[in-house]
Image: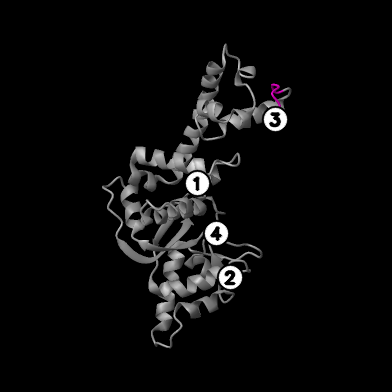
Amino acid sequence: MSHEPPSNLLELQRFFARWVMQPQPLHRVAQEQPRHLCESVSAVVRAPDEDTALARLSIYHRMIFARLHASLAEDFPALAAVLGEQGFRALAAEFLVAHPSGGPNLRDVGRPLPGFLARLPRQRSDLAELARLEWARVHAFDARDDRPLTVALLHAAGESLPRVRLVAGTRVLEVRHDVDAVWAAADRDQTIPMAAARPGALLVWKRALVVWHRRLEPWEREPLAWLRSAASSDGVELGELCVRLAPDDDPESVARVWTRLQQWLAEGLLTVAAPGASV
């Protein structure tokens, strides 16, 4: 790396990024890594001396990490509520050191956070599950806005039953704790309980620009897994889905199928499949 100051805009942008896009305090970087950076800040930042130049550049450095912290808090509000302001700030700083932002889009900054939490031996295991739930909600919100299949649309189709699939962004999360109760308490600004052991699965999806999640009922596991396995295809036949909603030979199975299908339609879980579309 040259000792000469940047001679054009691209070099100036690279200089700026080298300093402000790394997570350590700039004075520490200047003291501990002078050979790595090999450049004088005061030769670029107008200032009477190197310390003043670093102080001025630090304004932008702090601003960037404040924005990254705010983005994480926006994507993981329940986790922030559980940890408290100082605890979440400390976690965000540790996370950003391990996973610095690698692109211009804030959308993906928090993607590695659930896995990062799962690898921290001193953290409660339920926090990683809570972060997974919140990231699944982010994913669902950003997914394509599909038009849900409704009972009215189904009646209008007559005998021409459509091929269907899950609405875009739908996810199923296996959990060991009642993180859904923790999330609900945080969302309502209530006292947040300690997560209790409650193995199960959570369904996350979007309807009418609002993200929802709830516990799966036992009968839903197999048909949902089948629907998700067909996500990369052109959907599934509605008649075959009905068979999977009540596969036994119980005389009341027809009524059960309609009740279960109505529940999914009311929740906006299904949409008419378009060729090439996926969840």
> Label 2 neighbourhood size at 10 Å, few (<14), some (14-19), many (20+)?
some
Q: Secondary structure at mark 3?
A: loop
Tell me the CA gap for discs 1 and 3.
Answer: 32 Å
4 in magenta: yes
Circles 1 and 3, Cβ within 8 Å, touching? The answer is no
Q: Which residue is mark 4?
A: 168
* Discs 1/3, front: 3
Tell me the CA gap for discs 2 and 1.
Answer: 28 Å
When the figure is inspected, residue 209 is found, relative to residue 159, above or below; the finding is above
Q: Nearer the viewer, residue 49 or 216?
A: 49
Q: Which residue is mark 2?
A: 230
Q: Which residue is mark 3?
A: 1
Tell me the CA gap for discs 4 and 2.
Answer: 13 Å
- From the viewer's perspective, is 160 left or right of 198? right
> Is tag 3's residue or tag 4's residue first in the polypeptide sequence?
3
Q: Which residue is mark 1?
A: 110
The x and y percentages for residue 237 are 58, 75
> At 33% across and 60% down in the image, what residue appears?
178
Q: Which residues are magenta?
A: 2-6
| Secondary structure mostly seen in the magenta stretch | loop
> Is tag 3's residue or tag 2's residue first in the polypeptide sequence?
3
> At 34% across and 61% down in the image, what residue appears?
177
Tell me the CA gap for discs 3 and 2.
Answer: 52 Å
* Discs 2/1, front: 1
* Discs 3/4, front: 3
* Discs 3/2, front: 3
Residue 108 seen in the figure: yes
> Is tag 1's residue or tag 4's residue first in the polypeptide sequence?
1
Q: Check the picture and name the quadrant holding the N terminus.
A: top right
